[in-house]
Image: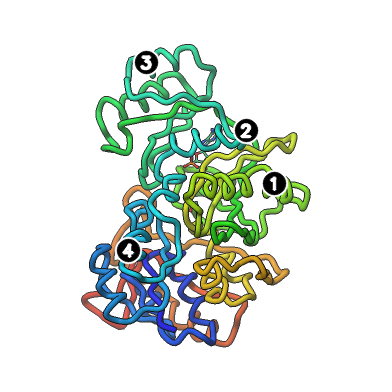
Amino acid sequence: MRLLVVGSGGREHAIAWKLAQSPQVEKIFVAPGNAGTALEAKLKNIPITSIPDLVSFARQEKIDLTVVGPEVPLTDGIVDAFQASGLRIFGPTRNGARLEGSKSFAKAFMLNHGIPTAACETFDDAAAAHRYIDRHSLPVVIKADGLAAGKGVVVAQTADEAHAAVDAMLVDNKLGAAGAHILIEDCLEGEEASFIVLSDGKNVLPLATSQDHKRLRDNDEGPNTGGMGACSPAPIITSDLHDKIMQEIILPVIRGMAQQSQPYVGFLYAGLMISPQGEIRVLEFNCRLGDPETQTIMLRLKSDLFILLDHAVNGTLGRESIEWDEQVALCVIMAAQGYPDSPRKNDIIHGLDSVMATQSHSDEFHVFHAGTARSSTDPTKIVTS
Ligand code: AMP
Ligand code: GLY
């Protein structure tokens, strides 16, 4: 089989690395990939990102299955475009991806299907939003409706912060169209966990649970980042909670999408808040795997990922099961100096050669790359980018 993986992060490196372990997979193109995917057996980077170019490439190269990592191509309709050209692709359609791409769509969907989440109101008028905040208790959460690359949520501790967030989105258009509609939401308390499933539109297989760590420094201090690490499983999700999450959240979403004639094929990620009393509320849905959660999930996955995704596209996941390594997996991010505000580019990353030599004899650990590149001045070196 010849596969195409779309994306360039640590998540896509981990997905492609796992797919390459399938005896059925002969070659995987990664578009555009990174300096780490360039080093893996069976993987080849190709510098393509636009959807029409990806469609042409998949046609030309007779790709058997395309797997999409990030949310942007999904919300842009890459799955619809591939399907319209008769190409097999794994992921939700543009409609399905609205669960992540439009927070107001996701809220309305949850309300319609009785899925527990924080109460909220939507606004596109700043004056009305300010009046609402004046009546609301603190803290309060301000969210851009659309995709904002992790910058669309402000958990405001003070009224000033909340008003400023409203102005940034609705008045100063700091987030562009993504922030032209906002949600103002009750602030939930508890511990967060990520619950991700694989669906063929009807059948659902839960993946191993996981939890990411967003603050820059130890002890949950410092600014939010794209994730400083992750662990799997998430200790907070007991087997009782697991059942409850499947019954109260995941299955209602999959059934609800199917009822709306929009069967959801793909990974579905529920970001959850678990209260000290064990109540579960949905913070967000993502229409894709998490990053860096995926890096830990792939290390624990013993089943053949290609076979699972192939069944998902065929609608035949019903008889499949997934086997997990019982061991815990941890992911620790080594970030560039200055991350997350102004990561420094072109610093040489030392020690990769020796670690790669060791990992080639071990299935206990793996280095996945994100934001790396070959040095333009010394091509034997990999640098931060
Ligand atoms: P989201 O993109 O909606 O997951 O928001 C990003 C992060 O903001 C979450 O992982 C939470 O840490 C926080 N967050 C979002 N919504 C809420 C909420 N209603 N209450 C408390 N924290 C929230
Ligand atoms: N790690 C959070 C996310 O992928 O959305």
Q: Nearer the viewer, residue 123 or 187?
A: 123
Mark in front: 2 vs 4: 4
Mark in front: 3 vs 4: 4
User: Is disc 3 surrounded by few (<14), some (14 to 19) or many (20+) residues within 10 Å?
Assistant: few
> Disc 3 marks which residue?
128
**On residue 247, which mark appears?**
1
Mark in front: 2 vs 1: 1
Q: Closer to the N terminus: mark 3 or mark 1?
A: 3
Q: Closer to the N terminus: mark 2 or mark 4?
A: 4
Q: Are marks 2 and 4 in contact (CB under 8 Å)?
A: no
Question: How far is the residue under mark 3 from the one under mark 1?
Answer: 37 Å
Q: Closer to the N terminus: mark 3 or mark 4?
A: 4
Q: Identify which amino acid the numbered label 2 is placed on.
A: Glu
Give the side of residue 38 with respect to residue 198, left or right: left
Mark 3 CB in 8 Å range of ligand 1?
no
Is 362 located above or below residue 267 in the figure?
A: below
User: Is disc 1 surrounded by few (<14), some (14 to 19) or many (20+) residues within 10 Å?
Assistant: few
Give the side of residue 30 with respect to residue 16, left or right: left
Is 68 located above or below residue 63 in the figure?
A: above
Q: Identify which amino acid the numbered label 1 is placed on.
A: Gln
Q: Closer to the N terminus: mark 3 or mark 2?
A: 3
Question: How far is the residue under mark 2 from the one under mark 1?
Answer: 22 Å
